[in-house]
Image (cartoon, rainbow, N blue to C red):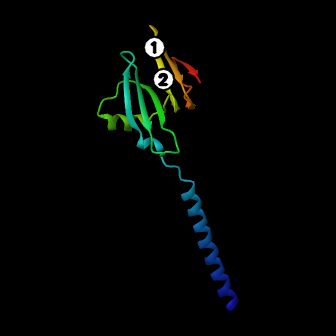
């Protein structure tokens, strides 16, 4: 009888330990959405159909640089918070710590962006976009 009781308690202990380990793993690997705290800084009308939006996230404090996200989209209506929430649902064209130096749209609707600064990511699946990166 004591052997069966010991096995039951060991089984309970191992089960609880595994649940704690899985919970700790999930908690430690949780990636918060950093784009929710982005603030809309600028909105530029490039053509009748294309707008360039810039958001900034400076929640990293003094040790993390301000992250800028640039979006190409149709006009988004609403106040700055509503626009930032809408932009958080679409992938940005460029993410980095630099800035867009020059923009242009040709007659065919092709958008040309010149970017200067550190780049974290570039969205490559945009049809009519030419991107020039300078260090």
Residue at the disc numbered 1: 104
Vertical order, 62 against 12 (above or below): above
- Measured as percent of width and height from the top left, residue 101 is found at 48, 20
Taking the view exactly as shown, the residue that stands out farthest to the top is 107
- Measured as percent of width and height from the top left, residue 68 is found at 47, 33
Residue at figure coordinates x 45%, y 14% from the top left: 104
Image quadrant holding the C terminus, namely top right
- Measured as percent of width and height from the top left, residue 115 is found at 52, 23
Quadrant in the rendering for residue 3: bottom right
Q: Name the foreground residue: 115 vs 112.
A: 115
Residue at figure coordinates x 64%, y 74% from the top left: 14
Residue at figure coordinates x 54%, y 24% from the top left: 116
Vertical order, 26 against 110 (above or below): below
Under circle 1, the secondary element is strand
Quadrant in the rendering for residue 5: bottom right
- Measured as percent of width and height from the top left, residue 9 is found at 63, 82
Residue at the disc numbered 2: 100
Image quadrant holding the N terminus, namely bottom right
């Amino acid at each position: 009888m004591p052997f069966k009781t010991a096995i039951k308690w060991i089984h309970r202990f191992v089960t609880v330990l595994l649940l704690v380990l899985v919970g700790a793993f999930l908690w430690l690997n949780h990636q918060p959405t950093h784009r929710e705290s982005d603030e809309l800084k600028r909105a530029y009308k490039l053509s009748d159909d294309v707008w360039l939006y810039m958001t900034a996230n400076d929640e990293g404090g003094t040790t993390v640089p301000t992250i800028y996200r640039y979006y190409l989209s149709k006009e988004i209506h609403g106040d700055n918070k509503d626009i930032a929430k809408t932009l958080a649902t679409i992938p940005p064209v460029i993410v980095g710590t630099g800035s867009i130096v020059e923009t242009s749209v040709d007659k065919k609707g092709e958008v040309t962006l010149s970017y200067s600064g550190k780049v974290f990511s570039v969205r490559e699946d945009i049809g009519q976009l030419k991107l020039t990166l300078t260090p």
